[in-house]
Image (cartoon, grey):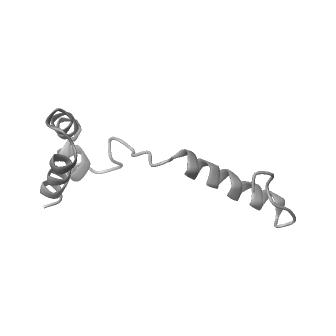
Amino acid sequence: MVRMKWEDFVEDNFNATETNRILADVDWDAWLYTPGLPPNTANFSTPSSDFANLLANEYVQMAGAASPKDY
């Protein structure tokens, strides 16, 4: 079920060349049936999330006494 939905999503959102490449890269046996962590870890970081993380860490370091310079 998950595999069909994923494949439908890819087919609906990418051209044929990209669809074939993306679907060929997924090792379903390793992802779903092999114990342990998945073979690839997705990276969802963006410049905005990296900046937000930096600001949060600066707030923690300042213990609420001040705001980061780029606030």
Judged from this view, the residue extending furthest toward the bottom is 64
Q: Describe residue 60's horizontal placement relative to residue 13 as left or right.
A: right
Report x, y in % for residue 27.
20, 41
Q: Residue at x 21, y 42 (%)?
A: 14
Q: Residue at x 76, y 51 (%)?
A: 70
Q: Residue at x 28, y 51 (%)?
A: 35
Q: Residue at x 70, y 55 (%)?
A: 55
Observer-nearest of 29 and 1: 1
Picture layout, residue 24 above or below residue 7: above
Q: How many marks?
A: 0
Which quadrant of the rendered structure holds the N terminus?
A: bottom left
Report x, y in % for residue 50.
59, 48
**Splitting the image into 4 quarters, where does residue 41 fall?**
top left
Picture layout, residue 15 above or below residue 12: above
Which quadrant of the rendered structure holds the C terminus?
A: bottom right
Observer-nearest of 26 and 55: 55
Q: Describe residue 1's horizontal placement relative to residue 26 as left or right.
A: left
Q: Describe residue 64's horizontal placement relative to residue 17 as left or right.
A: right
Judged from this view, the residue extending furthest toward the right is 65
Report x, y in % for residue 63.
82, 64
Report x, y in % for residue 23.
18, 40
Observer-nearest of 30 and 55: 55
